[in-house]
Image (cartoon, grey):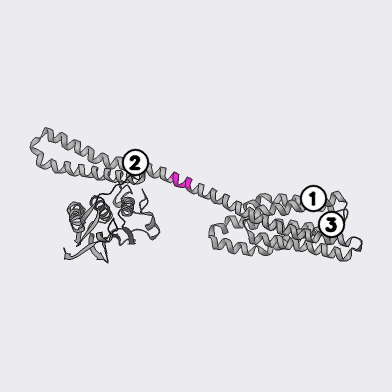
Amino acid sequence: MSDALRRHVLGFLLASTMAAMSWPYARAEAVLLWLGLVFAGTAVRRPLARHFLDVVDHGGPLAREAFLRRLLPYYAVMGLVWGASVFLFAQRSEGIREFACWAVLAALVYGAAYRLALLPTLWMAFLSTFFLCVLCYFAYAAITRTDDRFGAMGFIPLCIAQFWFLRRLSTDVRRIQSALYGAQYDLACKSEEALAAVVAKNKFLAAATHDMRQPVIAMGLYAEFLEAEPDSYDELAPKIGRAAQVVNRLFDSLFDLSAFDAGQVRLTVAPVSVASVIRALQEEYEPLAQARGLTLRVRVRDAVLQTDEVRLKRMIGNVVSNAIKYTRPGGKVLLAVRPAGDRVRVEVWDQGIGIPAAQIEKVFQEFFRADGGSQLAPDGLGIGLALVARLADALRARVSIDSVEGRGTRVSLTLRDVEAEPSRRVQLSAASG
């Protein structure tokens, strides 16, 4: 359609050239009528193209398809109009003029083949009526012109061959243009993704620097104060330890992401008690929940998995950390473990801000943060769930998220043995905690 806006002047020029060369041989009224129809059709095409670009194109695929269907009669009529031009010059004018007129028609048709190849329905409407009109002329000439009947009839198979060739040509052009536009689209998407990645990396570095700087500065201050006041060891040592844990946890996440990207993750697989992992996480995150005014509840049934204990703890811990981070004070977070056939399902429920439905699939992307997340956790990096997805893939776990915006989120982790031999299947017990 944008091409139609640029080429309407060329349509006027071709039509004027055809009329000028046919003028001495055809009736003036017929030439003027034909020229008026071409000008009218070309003038109509411009507002149609403008309407498509300004209004229809923004309405989605269905609106575009409906609009193109409405254009079918227009292109069929324009095919008839241009095909009717042969009645003005064919076998009427002198050789050079007739050849020039045929050259104009060839330029028009072959040029249209390249422009309309991606719209095969409109192209076939134009092409079919154009050649139908040309065939009608030569059939009429074969009947009425007794002096050169066989010459006129000879053009009929030539027209049919040209029709077949143009159909093949447009098919090839459509295939090539589709591949070209597909490559251009992929390149544009990759360019946008690369630009977004650069922006996200810059934000990530700023946030990571901020997150690491605070506990490191705190440790330095605590150490200086401890050096000046050795008697305050009992008070300052736990604070230094907590600050070190924050830095270590951030480094662990960054190292894991780097290792996954480099394909250098090595799992240490051994029998792991899921209940022990959950209890350790409860001890680690319960103080954080209490500090934020939240209630952390744990419901667990024990199971033994053949898995990597450190990575399993980190995967579940990131989910629990997110639940605590994005739940408003006074809310509750539930960490539950229950059997699921021959597997184990770990579920983390929160009463947080929730995730918009359109963004649930994006939360596993690195550095992505759902709407509203920066209000409760302004320094978040957006790598927690991205790391959960990587760890889940390595541990042969399945992650699913159900969320209601403004009410809360449930993250489900379906766990199984990392090694799938029958002798190492999940062992469940009826013990509950």
The stretch of residues the image draws in magenta is 190-195
- Does residue 385 appear to the left or right of 239 in the view shown? right
For the residue pair 351 and 349, the one nearer the viewer reads as: 349
Q: Which residue is mark 3?
A: 90
Task: Identify the residue at horizontal 66%, vertical 52% (top origin).
Answer: 114
Query: Per the image, is 350 magenta?
Result: no
Instruction: Give the crowd class for mark 1: few <14, some 14-19, many >=20 residues within 10 Å.
Output: some
Q: Which residue is mark 2?
A: 205
Task: Identify the residue at horizontal 73%, vertical 60% (top origin).
Answer: 79
Q: Which numbered dot is residue 17?
A: 1
Q: Position of residue 93 (x, y in %)?
A: 87, 53
Marks 3 and 2, how far apart at CA: 74 Å
Mark 3 vs mark 1: in front:
3
Pick the quarter of the image with the N terminus: bottom right
For the residue pair 400 and 2, the one nearer the viewer reads as: 400
Considering only order in the chain, which callout, 2 or 3, is on the residue closer to the N terminus?
A: 3
Q: Amino acid at mark 2?
A: Leu
Pick the quarter of the image with the C terminus: bottom left
- Does residue 280 appear to the left or right of 8 in the view shown? left
Q: Position of residue 312 (x, y in %)?
A: 25, 53
Callout 1 secondary element? helix
Instruction: Give the crowd class for mark 2: few <14, some 14-19, many >=20 residues within 10 Å.
Output: few
Marks 2 and 1, how far apart at CA: 65 Å
Marks 3 and 1, how far apart at CA: 15 Å
Q: Amino acid at mark 3?
A: Ala
